[in-house]
C-alpha cells in the first residue's frame, strides 16, 4: 500500500498539472459516473494529501476523495489521450495533461462537512505544515498496544505504512513490542523529527531511503544502493550488528526488526 510520501507527491503533481484549469472528469468504467458528473467541467482549485488520502478541491466546493488502497494507481498521459484501457475508475483531462485512475479503494465526491469527518479520524500527518506531534503522543501514551501496531494506526499518525514503521523503530532502537504507554515525550519528539525528515526525502526522491550516510558502505541492494535497515530483510545480517533480522506478523502486517539493536 502506498505510504504518505507517495500521496503527497501525487498531490504536488496534480497541483502543477491541473490547478486553475477546467477539468473534464469521466468514469469510463462507470462506477464513478455520478460523482464524475458533479465535478466535470469545473475549475480545479487545489490538490492536497492527508496521510494516505488524496483530495481534489473544485470551485464548486466539492472534493473528490481518493484512497488508493493496495491496488489503486494513476497512469499519466500527454495529450491527446488515447482510448481508456482496462477498468478506469476516473479519467481527468486538462489542457496539456491527463491521468487515469484504476483500482482505488475509494473514489468519491464529498461535501466539506463529510471531508471534515474523515480529517477528524486521522492523526497528525508529518508532511503537513503546522501538525502537532503532541496529538499523536497523547494517543501513544494512553495505550498498552505495541508501538509497532500504534504507528500503523492512522488515527495516531497519518501516512505511516509498513516500511516507515519498521525503519523508524530501528533507527531509534525501539522494540516493536514496546507498549505505547512506555514511550516518553522526549523519545517521541525525536522520532517525530526523524519521521518528518525521512518522509520529506521520500517526497523529494520518490522512494523511501532510511539509511544514514555513515551506515551506507556501498553494497548493492537490488538494483541500487541500500535503502533500508530491516524492512524485507528477514534472515539477513543486521547492517549494524550482524544479527539476523527477525520477522513476525503483528495485527495482520509483516513486521521486521533486529533483536539485538531493538531489544525487548
Image: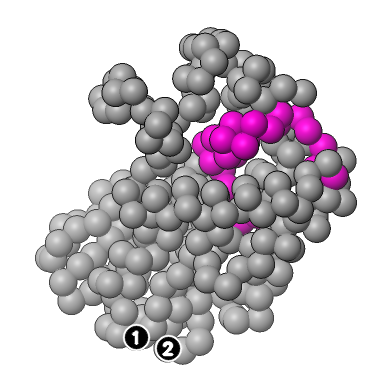
* Count of residue discs: 2
Q: Quick one: which residue is furthest to the front in this view?
A: 214
Residue range highlighted in magenta? 155-181
Q: Residue at x 33, y 48 (%)?
A: 206
Q: Is residue 48 left or right of residue 25?
A: right
Residue 8 position within the rendered picture, expressed as x and y whole percent measured from the top left: 43, 60
Q: Is residue 38 left or right of residue 259?
A: left
Q: Residue at x 72, y 51 (%)?
A: 186
Q: Quick one: which residue is furthest to the bottom in this view?
A: 60
Bin the neighbour count of mark 2 within 10 Å (Cα to Cα): few under 14, some 14-19, many 20 and up. Answer: some
Q: Residue at x 73, y 63 (%)?
A: 134
If you read the primary sequence from the N terminus, does the residue marked by circle 2 or circle 1 appear first? 1
Say which mark, if any, is on residue 43: 1
Residue located beneath label 2 in the image? 59
Bin the neighbour count of mark 1 within 10 Å (Cα to Cα): few under 14, some 14-19, many 20 and up. Answer: some
Residue 184 position within the rendered picture, expressed as x and y whole percent measured from the top left: 78, 48
- Say what secondary structure mark 1 lies in: strand
Residue 105 position within the rendered picture, expressed as x and y whole percent measured from the top left: 53, 51
Amino acid at each position: 500500500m502506498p505510504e504518505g510520501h507517495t500521496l503527497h507527491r501525487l498531490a504536488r503533481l496534480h497541483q502543477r498539472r491541473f490547478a486553475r484549469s477546467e477539468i473534464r472528469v469521466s468514469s469510463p468504467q462507470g462506477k464513478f459516473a455520478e460523482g464524475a458528473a458533479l465535478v466535470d467541467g469545473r475549475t480545479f482549485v487545489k490538490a492536497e494529501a492527508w496521510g494516505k488520502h488524496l483530495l481534489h478541491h473544485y470551485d464548486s466546493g466539492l472534493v473528490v476523495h481518493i484512497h488508493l488502497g493496495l491496488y489503486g494507481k494513476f497512469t499519466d498521459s500527454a495529450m491527446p489521450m488515447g482510448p481508456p484501457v482496462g477498468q478506469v475508475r476516473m479519467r481527468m483531462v486538462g489542457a496539456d495533461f491527463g491521468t487515469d485512475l484504476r483500482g482505488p479503494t475509494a473514489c468519491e465526491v464529498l461535501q466539506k462537512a463529510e471531508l471534515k469527518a474523515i480529517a477528524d479520524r486521522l492523526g497528525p500527518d508529518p508532511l503537513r505544515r503546522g501538525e502537532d506531534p503532541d496529538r499523536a503522543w497523547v494517543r501513544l501514551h494512553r495505550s498498552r498496544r505495541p508501538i509497532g501496531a500504534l504507528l500503523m494506526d492512522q488515527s495516531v499518525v497519518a501516512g505511516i505504512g509498513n516500511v516507515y514503521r519498521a525503519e523508524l523503530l530501528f533507527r531509534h532502537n525501539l522494540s516493536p513490542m514496546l507498549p505505547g504507554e512506555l514511550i516518553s515525550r522526549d523519545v517521541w519528539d525525536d522520532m517525530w523529527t526523524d519521521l518528518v525528515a525521512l518522509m520529506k526525502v521520500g517526497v523529494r526522491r520518490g522512494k523511501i531511503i532510511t539509511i544514514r550516510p555513515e551506515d551506507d558502505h556501498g553494497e548493492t541492494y537490488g538494483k541500487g544502493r541500500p535503502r533500508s535497515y530491516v524492512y524485507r530483510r528477514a534472515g539477513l545480517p543486521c547492517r549494524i550488528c550482524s544479527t539476523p533480522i527477525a520477522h513476525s506478523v503483528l495485527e495482520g502486517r509483516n513486521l521486521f526488526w533486529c533483536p539485538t539493536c531493538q531489544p525487548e
